Every structure is written in C-alpha cells, then in structure tokens.
Amino acid sequence: MSSTIPEKIGIITSIEEKKLHKKGTRNSEDIGGTLGGQEEITAEIPGIKRTEVELEKLKAEMKGFIAAMREILDEADPPDSQMRLEEVELSVEVNGEGKVSLLGIGGKAGGKGAMTLKFKRKDG
C-alpha cells in the first residue's frame, strides 16, 4: 500500500454569517406584524465550513512563520544572559486561505483553526 501526499489540505473553520433583513418585512423569523419604519437588522448565524488550501501555500506560510519565530526567540535568549529560555509554547491560527498567524491574548479566532507549536531548546 503506497501513500501519496495530497495537493490540497482541508481546513475546517468557524464562520459567522451575517443575515440582513428589513424590520417590518416578512421572513422566516417573522413574529408578527409591525407597521412603520424599514429599519435594517443584522443577525449573526454561527456555523462551520471546510476550505481546501494548497499544500505548497500552507508549507510556505509555515516555513516563513517558523523562521520568523526562530529569529525572535534567538534574540530573546542572548548567550551572555544569566537566565536561559528553555521552552516556548505558541498558539497559531490558520485561516481559510492558509495564512498562518500568532494568536494573541484576547484574540478572537473566528473563521480560523488553531494549533499549538512548542519550541524546545536542543541539548548541548
């Protein structure tokens, strides 16, 4: 049995679809007749969707992200320091287009998938 590497990878993301209707008009959420203004109402409908992302694009994004993190972490641990940085754990999000970003504190990961990358110092 031989395994082949796929050209695309599926990413499942959460979505918030905005539904717009005019107040006072009929729709599936009609709760009775109101007369008067035509005020617009927006409702957010949560859901999920699967998006196909080219493997080469995702690989390039991850390589660039990891290279940037290595450079940042090397500068955070100078050789003449009294303390050593042993391990760093980062939360990373991948959106439906395959873009890789660092997930900040208090960040909202709407429409994205998250993963954790753990960087550990080599012995020696």
Image: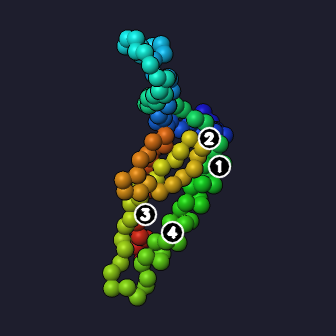
Q: Which residue is mark 2?
A: 53
Mark 4 falls on what kind of element?
helix
Which mark is on residue 57?
1
User: Seen from this angle, which residue lies furthest front?
Assistant: 36
Q: Is residue 22 above or below residue 2?
A: above
Distance, label 3 to label 4, CA atoms, is: 9 Å
- 21 and 77: which is toward the camera: 21
Could you tell me which residue is drawn at 33 percent across and 81 percent down? 83
- 52 and 122: which is toward the camera: 52
Distance, label 1 to label 4, CA atoms, is: 20 Å
* Mark earlier in primary sequence (2, 4): 2
Name which residue type carries label 1: Lys
Q: Residue 44 appears at what percent x and percent y?
A: 44, 31
Name which residue type carries label 2: Val
Q: Report the side of 102 relative to 9 (left or right).
A: left
- Which picture quadrant has residue 3? top right
* Labels 3 & 4 near each other (Cβ < 8 A): yes
Distance, label 2 to label 4, CA atoms, is: 25 Å
Could you tell me which residue is drawn at 65 percent across and 49 percent down? 57
* Mark earlier in primary sequence (1, 4): 1
- 21 and 75: which is toward the camera: 21
Q: Which residue is mark 3?
A: 119
* Labels 1 & 2 near each other (Cβ < 8 A): yes
